[in-house]
Image: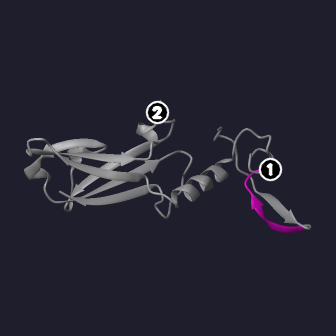
Amino acid sequence: PDLTFSITLNTCLSGGSPLGFRPSHETCLMRNMSSPDFCVVCLEGMWTNLLSRMHLIDSVQVNPSNNGQSVKVVLNAVLLAQLRKGGPLPGEKYTVTWIQGATVVTDLADKFLWELPEGSARGEWRVRLEYSTSEVRYDPKNYLTSVATFKI
């Protein structure tokens, strides 16, 4: 969709009385079924509405190696951004932060798969997955962030 057009306030009327405002008049698919795109306000609303009902993290798999010397961890997430087939759309990105105990492990930044020696991997872990997209400019309830905890 073209996100460069302007947003205006158009009065919604019910029986001649003002009911509220719409961000566009005839340029949004939500109002005009022959329009090819949703306006930026409706797109943002659909993203936050959808993400309020789900988590971006599907699972975290912890697998010891065959010899027990190391541990492989896999973050399974919704197929957006870098995980999207065909690559990310313009303006979208996942940011992955791995936290062991209270320490951010910077060497694992933005990794969905990693392997460490069992001794250094042992402990309480938290992974934070943040999705950013140009279609959502404001996320006060952190719907675009998911957190999972696990122990090794």
Front position in the image: 72 or 6: 72
Amino acid at dot 1: His
Front position in the image: 89 or 83: 83
Tell me the residue at 39%/52% (across/down): 58
Tell me the residue at 77%/44% (across/down): 27
Amino acid at dot 2: Lys
Tell me the residue at 51%/36% (across/down): 89
Tell me the residue at 65%/48% (across/down): 40
- Give the label, 1 or 2, closer to the camera: 2
Q: Residue furthest top?
A: 86
Look at the numbered disc 1 and give the secondary structure of its residue: loop
Give residue 62's position: percent from left, percent from top: 23, 50
Magenta region's main secondary structure? Answer: strand
Q: Quadrant of residue 17?
A: bottom right
Q: Which residues are magenta?
A: 17-25
Q: CA distance from mark 1 to mark 2?
A: 34 Å
